[in-house]
Amino acid sequence: PLLHGTRSLGVLAAALAYVFVGSDDSTPAPTPPPPAASKPLRPTVSAITARVVSGPELKAAAASSSHPVYWAGPRPGVRYELTRATDGRTYVRYLTPGAVVGDTASRYLVIATYPQAGAFNAVSAEAAKPGNTRIDLPAGGLAVAAPGRPQAVYLSYPGADYQVEVFSPKPGEARRLVSNGSVRPLGGGTPVAT
């Protein structure tokens, strides 16, 4: 979920790395702190340890989620890596050729969907902060990019009980994918907007 204050992308990367690598099911993955004035939802779903899946397998896994799971659509020359925590946090990574499943490096496109009460309000509050960039989306959706986290964009929709993070190591790619509508629901739950 959206981080506040002086917390850096490194904190999020460390949490994501733990989830991606954490194949020891006896140790629960850490939960990133939720934004102020919102509570993470606590659905219980079966965890999926980081693994490469086909497009149809990715859609089937998304369909089993109680909330929508987002992705950036099909992309040539990549493998889809899927990870899901028991609290419903779902990560779709686009692995380039030669990438190792569960690699902790932040060099891949990641679309993360977080179940979270008050998600839209949290994104709205961040978008209103001086220096942050607000991106208006169709159907009343809203995205925000912060100068302290230039590789990530966060988005949500009015009434949504989830927040989406788009992370890319390529400068400007996360913003471009969100702005041009490439980031969309893959399946699961009922999306507030498509």
Image: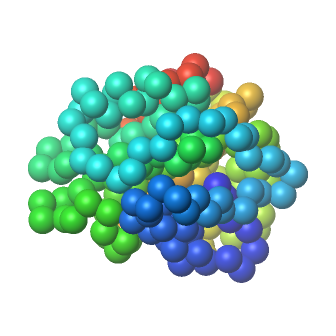
Q: Position of residue 70 (x, y in %)?
A: 46, 37
Q: Position of residue 157 (x, y in %)?
A: 66, 34
**The N terminus appears in which quarter of the rendering?**
bottom right
In the rendered image, the residue lying farthest to the right is 37
Q: Is residue 169 above or below residue 193?
A: below
Task: Give the image quarter of residue 125.
Answer: bottom right
Instruction: Pick whichever, 128 or 7, lies toward us.
Output: 7
Instruction: Pick whichever, 160 or 103, lies toward us.
Output: 103
User: What residue sits 62% from the left and 24% below the top?
Assistant: 192
User: What residue sits 54% from the left and 67% below the top?
Assistant: 15
Q: Position of residue 30 (x, y in %)?
A: 61, 63
Instruction: Pick whichever, 39 or 35, lies toward us.
Output: 39
In the rendered image, the residue lying farthest to the top is 190
Q: Is residue 178 visible?
A: no
User: What residue sits 54% from the left and 78% below the top?
Assistant: 10
User: What residue sits 35% from the left and 74% below the top?
Assistant: 105
- As drawn, is 96 to the left or to the right of 110? left
Q: How many marks?
A: 0
Task: Give the image quarter of residue 153.
Answer: bottom right
- As drawn, is 17 to the left or to the right of 133? left
Q: Is residue 14 above or below residue 110?
A: below
Task: Give the image quarter of residue 142.
Answer: top right
**Which colour assignment does the render follow?**
rainbow
Q: Is residue 53 visible?
A: yes
Q: Is residue 23 above or below residue 8?
A: above
Q: Position of residue 21 (x, y in %)?
A: 39, 65
- As drawn, is 4 to the left or to the right of 83? right
